[in-house]
Image (cartoon, grey):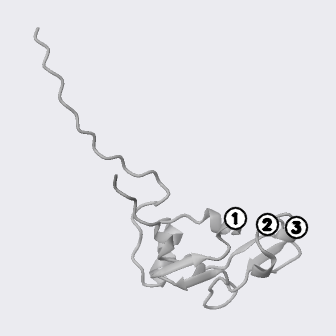
């Protein structure tokens, strides 16, 4: 059985080093959510922003590694909804990859893999 290649996000990280990430206060642990308190700062009374994403050259404080080589998210299991909803190979993904000099992804990695062609034996011709 052929193994699937690793998810392209594990080598990329461009979105984490290109975008501001704002989300509802209710995604924060102190308000019943899962995002750890030290990784975000209040923006308004109801909105938070991931630390590190509010700069001219953003880089999320939870991102580890080197963009385009090997990266990881330190709060992956607890990341906020904008991170969960960001789709690999989307137009937005390919734009931030381009900013970092990375090639565009041609497929949505979350899509089911293309099935292997099925070998079959042709049915015998009906004599009749």
- Mark 2–mark 3 contact, CB under 8 Å? yes
**With respect to residue 33, does 121 lie above or below?**
above
Q: Which residue is mark 2?
A: 27
Q: Is residue 78 left or right of residue 93?
A: right
Spatial CA distance of label 1 from label 3 is 15 Å
Spatial CA distance of label 2 from label 3 is 7 Å
Q: Quadrant of the C terminus?
A: top left
Measuring 39% from the left and 76% from the top, which residue is drawn there?
103
- Element class at badge 2: helix
Residue furthest front as drawn = 1
Confirm whether residue 14 shows in the render.
Answer: no
- Mark 1–mark 2 contact, CB under 8 Å? yes
Observer-side mark, 1 or 3, equals 3
**With respect to residue 20, does 76 lie above or below?**
above
Q: Which residue is mark 1?
A: 81
Spatial CA distance of label 1 from label 2 is 8 Å
Measuring 34% from the left and 52% from the top, which residue is drawn there?
1
The percent coordinates of residue 44 (x first, y second) are 85, 78
Circle 1 packing at 10 Å, graded few (<14), some (14-19), many (20+), is some
Q: Which residue is mark 3?
A: 31
Circle 3 packing at 10 Å, graded few (<14), some (14-19), many (20+), is few
Circle 2 packing at 10 Å, graded few (<14), some (14-19), many (20+), is many
Between 88 and 113, which is closer to the camera in this rendering? 113
The percent coordinates of residue 72 (x first, y second) are 57, 76
Q: Is residue 107 left or right of residue 40?
A: left
Q: Is residue 52 left or right of residue 100?
A: right
């Amino acid at each position: 059985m052929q193994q699937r290649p690793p998810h392209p996000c594990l080598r990329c990280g461009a979105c984490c080093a290109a975008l501001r990430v704002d989300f509802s206060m209710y995604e924060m642990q102190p308000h019943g959510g899962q995002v750890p308190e030290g990784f975000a700062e209040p923006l308004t009374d109801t909105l938070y922003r991931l630390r590190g994403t509010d700069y001219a050259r953003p880089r999320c404080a939870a991102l580890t590694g080197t963009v385009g080589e090997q990266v990881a998210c330190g709060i992956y299991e607890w990341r906020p909804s904008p991170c969960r909803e960001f789709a690999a190979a989307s137009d937005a993904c390919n734009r931030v990859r381009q900013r970092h000099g990375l090639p565009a992804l041609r497929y949505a990695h979350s899509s089911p893999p293309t099935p292997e062609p099925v070998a079959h034996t042709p049915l015998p011709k009906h004599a009749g």
